[in-house]
Image (cartoon, rainbow, N blue to C red):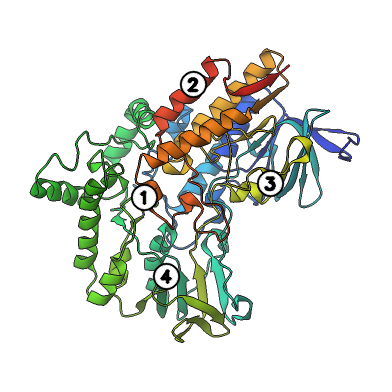
Amino acid sequence: MSATTAPASAHGATDAHVLDALIIGAGFSGLYQLHALRDRLGLSAQVLEAGDGVGGTWYWNRYPGARCDSESHSYAYYFSDELVQEWTWSERYPGQAEILRYLNHVADRFDLKRDIRFGARVTEAHYDAAANRWHVRTEAGERYTATYLITAVGCLSAANIPQIPGLDSFAGQWYHTGQWPHEGVDFTGKRVGMVGTGSTGIQAAPVIADSAAHLTVFQRTANYSIPARNAPLAEEFKHWAKQNASEIKRTMRSTPNGHPFVIADRSAHDVSEAERRAIYEAAWEKGGLQFRASFRDLLQDKAANDTAAAFLRSKIGEIVKDPATAAKLAAIDHPFATKRPPIDTGYFETFNRDNVALVDVRATPIERVTPAGIQTRDGTEYPLDIIVFATGFDAMTGPLLKMDIRGRDDVSLRDAWQAGPRTYLGLQVPGFPNLFTITGPGSPSVLCNMPVPIEHHVEWIADCIRTMRENGIARIEAKPEAAEKWVEHVNDAANATLLPQAGHSWYLGANVPGKPRVFMPYAGGMARYRDICADVVARNYEGFSLTR
């Protein structure tokens, strides 16, 4: 259904597009939410998307080596059996281009693009209590009004560009991996500096090193990484994945992280040192995130975690030939998997190349960018033609706070979240009626294989709106006391694990200067979270205020 237009409102929204529901973002979340509201509920719904195409994360992140760390057969929608059967992935871990093709296929298959407005960056969304409407404006000045506002902006979409003195003076080119030029970047014969060694930097470094004259990697926080063992999928596996789609879906929905594998029901202390080493070796050879599933207590027990950490550090020492470089790469200051655990294709091997150097910026911090390159505190200047910032994102809250979202009594979301995000179930914020946040802070989101929590949230929101419309409920809003209890529960769930021990983690917002240190995702597990959300509904949306 297309939007209609209406005359001016109290907010001056002259000729605003009038809708039942407005969705911000056309990635995995926004596409499915549009399908659920428009095609299943019959609502007039539209998506506003800042980019010129669908894809969200995979539209913007086109950096060298960009690849998913969930296995392809699980990194997909499972709401449609036909969709699962008709799409065939080519690799164990899909690259950016293939994921983008998949999402375009989904958008075309369900005829979603006719209700997506591309190149429409939302700048403000204000709630009008008298009319019970959200008034939304884009950067170009277009206005929309809707009863329900759903943010599908992604958890990792607001680029975190470090404020380094002198960056404006740099004579070469610089890029952030999350805002990569669509035409690509030619590194041939160039001296490249890459700042950051999280998942993105670990993916990008080997590819950049292949063509650059020289690559200097500036490492603040050493990181674990496990080989992906990426390869084309065998025909037998493709057939198996389709034949067993319902079982794969059931497994993903029953595991804490939404992946298609089960965590072993054994402690790292249940086996001898030799057996443990053999289990880790087998997991290392298999590759991928399943390494974390070797033992059930790796994220709960520090001594158990230490066994995995020691094994992974020993692997760095085996791979990297120069002892000093290996020592820097293995000087990891946090328990394994308490930061997002990267998987790689030849990352540590990259440091054996003659054209690659590692700079430890914890020992000698970056002081400034000069016209010729990067200068560290010890006075060393590294001459560069290109700087790549693989410095991640203002995660989870950043994409929401970039917009001027104002709820009841003109209270801004930024003010409401001054001390850190306050949500109920990661789905709603007190004071912001009929605003839903897909995979918002306080939900499992980034601790999971993302399509699983996305599908759950989209379906929960659609069911909620259906219930509201069937029962004459005009408004739903999280109660402040329910949000406070939920935030406490989120903190308790995190503190029951080792996750808060990673001091520089973006899970805590610690990568963004001035951001409140609050553990943002829900660490209690996706399956447990699903049950909690279902119980809230069964209790007539307990914790929410419903207004007829």
User: Do the numbered discs 1 and 2 sit on residues whose CB atoms are within 8 Å?
Assistant: no
Which of pointers 1 and 3 lies earlier in the amino acid sequence? 1
Q: Amino acid at mark 4?
A: Ile
Q: Amino acid at mark 1?
A: Thr
User: Which label lies toward us, 4 or 3?
Assistant: 3
Residue identifier under label 3: 415
Inter-mark Cα distance, 1 to 2? 28 Å
**Residue 96 at least partly seen:** yes
Residue identifier under label 1: 338
Q: Residue at x 83, y 28 (%)?
A: 130
Quadrant of image for the C terminus: top right
Inter-mark Cα distance, 4 to 2? 46 Å
Which of pointers 4 and 3 lies earlier in the amino acid sequence? 4
Residue identifier under label 2: 534
User: Seen in the image, is 371 located left or right of residue 203?
Assistant: right
Inter-mark Cα distance, 4 to 1? 27 Å
Which of pointers 1 and 2 lies earlier in the amino acid sequence? 1
**Callout 2: SS:** helix
Pointer 4 local density, CA inside 10 Å: few below 14, some 14–19, many at least 20: many
User: Seen in the image, is 235 located left or right of residue 211?
Assistant: left
**Residue 110 at least partly seen:** no
Residue identifier under label 4: 208
Q: Is residue 260 above or below residue 535?
A: below
Q: Residue at x 48, y 46 (%)?
A: 519
